[in-house]
Amino acid sequence: MATLIFGLPMAKTSKRNTVKKGGLQLMCSLAFLSLLALYACQKREETIELVWNNQRATGISIPKHLVKNFSSAAIDPSIKVVLGNNVDQAILGNFSADNSKLLFEPLIPLTPGLTYRILENNRSIGQLFVPFNKNEKAPEVLAIYPLLDTLPENLLKFYIQFSKPMRTGESLQFIHLLDKKGDTLRDVFLNLQPELWDTSGTVLTLWLDPGRIKRGLTLNRALGNPLKRNEMYQLVISPEWKDNTGLKLSQKCSKTFVAGKRDEQAPDIKQWQLQLPKAGTTASLRINTQESLDHYLLSESIGIVDQNNTLVKGKIRLDKKDQQVVFAPAKPWKAQRYQLQVDARLEDLAGNNLNRVFDRDITKAKSRTKNYYELAFEVTP
Amino acid sequence: MKKITLLVAVGVLGMLFISSTYQKAANKYNFSKGTPAVKSIAALVFGPDGVLFIGDSQSSTVFAVETKDTKKAASAQYDVKNIDVKIAEALGTTKENVSIIDMAVNPVSKKLYIAVKSADGTPVLLSLGTNNELKAVSLTDVNFSSTAVNNPPDETKKDRQGKPLSLMSISDMGFEDGKLLLSGLCNKEFSSSFRSVSFPFTGKAEEEATLELYHANHGRFETTSPVRTFSTTTIEGKKYVVASYTCTPLVLFPMDELKPGAHVKGRTIAEMGNRNTPSDMIWLKDGNQTFLVMANDNRPAFKVSHEEIAKFQGTLTEKVEGTAGTNFIILPHEKVLQLAKLDENKAVVIQKKSNGDIDLWTSDGKNI
């Protein structure tokens, strides 16, 4: 090993003293190596380093020997972290100390691509650059809902599902609706702040401007529906959109669709068709809803109870572009009567729910106030 | 000896009295000490005694935090050019990596509190002192309480797999008559959720009211729609919520109808132009009159006098061209992003200027 490091191959010799000399040399080399390793270790501990948490630079570790006034450094305003050459503005955050180092934790993670400096009494004691994480994968668009290629002209919303949490508050800079000529349509989406993201930060709800869909409103009369029947459209998501770690989308993503006829009917579960399983099996119950319904609400708003009104445990998945619900029970079906229960808040693609249509004509339709609707079915041997 | 015993007894009693009153003050709002797990800040509003309500959309929770910022001040003057750059510098980043989400003035100390979000989603609470210096507001080891706003405390509102239904994003909050009022937008269903919660929070269902607000469009189509921003007012002794919508600007709802599960129909009193989302509304005095001042994302700010609102008895039923209903005054300030009441006459404003700069300034009480 010594020979490899120092590049001094040890000659083989038959003389004893040469062997002794060789042994001494080896020992010296090993001792020197150990010292070097120790020095290297110490050196590693002694540099200013970034502290990473969940692939974010959440702190700066400053070794004791670099700080003159270490004992009071954690509470001493003479130490500060600044961005680049902006020496006047101390970055807001907390200092804490242990026996060997001072830890600075800023209020927000340090930004990749920027350089930070540590000053003590305005004298620089070190600086560091925050690198981009090379192992991090670029975010992708996993799905755009609704999945159908023909959507009602009074479509209320899109859901866009990403592989990672995206930067929020700027979605409308990167999402556009194009007409068949490829021109961007303006004022189509509702500009909401805060935007509507799910708890994981990966699913965005994007509303078409309800003011333009709702009949009778100024905006509807002035600009008309955002979508016109029989026209072709393309929803485009720009690859310039970054995720919350600063990485751009892996590629441009789009969905082409045609606007179909207006949907002015509340979903009616009596029209749903059930493909019934046999008793004693764990075959899935398939529920054909006859129309595409809201992707997220559909999987959340359906439940099945047995004749004792006990919830049947199982798993729900959606099929046929959100026009079919597949329920796989955890235990075999019994030969008995079951009830399918559907939460009244379930909406179709135009925002009509089980109780009311999106904009109710009070001269005609009546709204209902039920919490859920039921549909009975019988499982037989 | 007797004298000494008596003195000691008085002393002990005194100590007990002091400690019990201290205990009472600390627990007046059922607070406990700790670090609230704030995941995001969507809205801020002050309650009594320097209690700050933090609306957290991501965890669908409102936190009530004791700021201990209770030193009285008459007024204040704030003026920070390029506030977005200043905030970014204080956080050690560049302006494109921060967004200003909301702000609120502590009515007692007049200190300004600003909610900021970084590009990675980290929420930050800052304060701006009268010296225009930004400081971090620590939420570590504070007295606080919280209430969930995601679902009513009713088990039937859970989905069949036991997961809570849709997430409610908090769009605005207010505090009136010991009640926290909040409007929300749901990320799944298109509904109007408006909630009133008694403070101190008890967690009891009867202390909360969730209701759906409806408004009629021109007498024919009735819809429910999420409230963007709201305020409260009194007209002829009756209290009202003045709400502005994602699509219809100004609607009045009687507050005495805000009962659990109620279907409350509002009266549309103005349509103030299209392609616009209102972001904030506050009441300010100018001379003998009180005005409702509204900030808009795509139109100049405007104000409506209380007198005009009270006078407009009708509901918009006829076909409207452009704007209609209550008369209002267009103010010479476009792109007002944030508006917070500072005192009876003045507001703190964050505005995007025509050159793209974002400035924070204090109104002179005339135009805003």
Image (spheres, grey):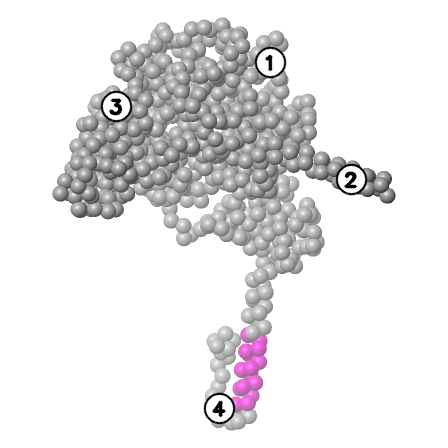
**Which quarter of the image is occupied by the C terminus of chain A?**
top left
Q: What kind of element bears circle 3?
A: loop
**Residue behind mark 4:** A13
Closest to the camera, between mark 4 and mark 3, is 3
Q: Which residue is mark 1?
A: B285
Question: Which mark is drawn over residue B219?
Answer: none
Instruction: Name the residue at the front extreme.
Output: B2
Q: Position of residue A112 (x, y in %)?
A: 49, 46
Residue A32: say if magenta.
Answer: yes
Q: Which residue is mark 3?
A: A266
Measured along the vertical axis of the image, is residue A4 above or below residue A81?
A: below
Mark 3 falls within which chain? A
Position of residue A186 measured from the top left corner of the image (x, y, whole percent): 35, 24
Overall secondary structure of the magenta section: helix
Q: Which residues are magenta?
A: A19-33
Picture layout, residue A338 above or below residue A155? below
Residue matched to label 2: B9
Query: Looking at the image, is mark 2 or mark 1 nearer the viewer?
Result: 2
Given residues B261 and A354, the one toward you in this image is B261
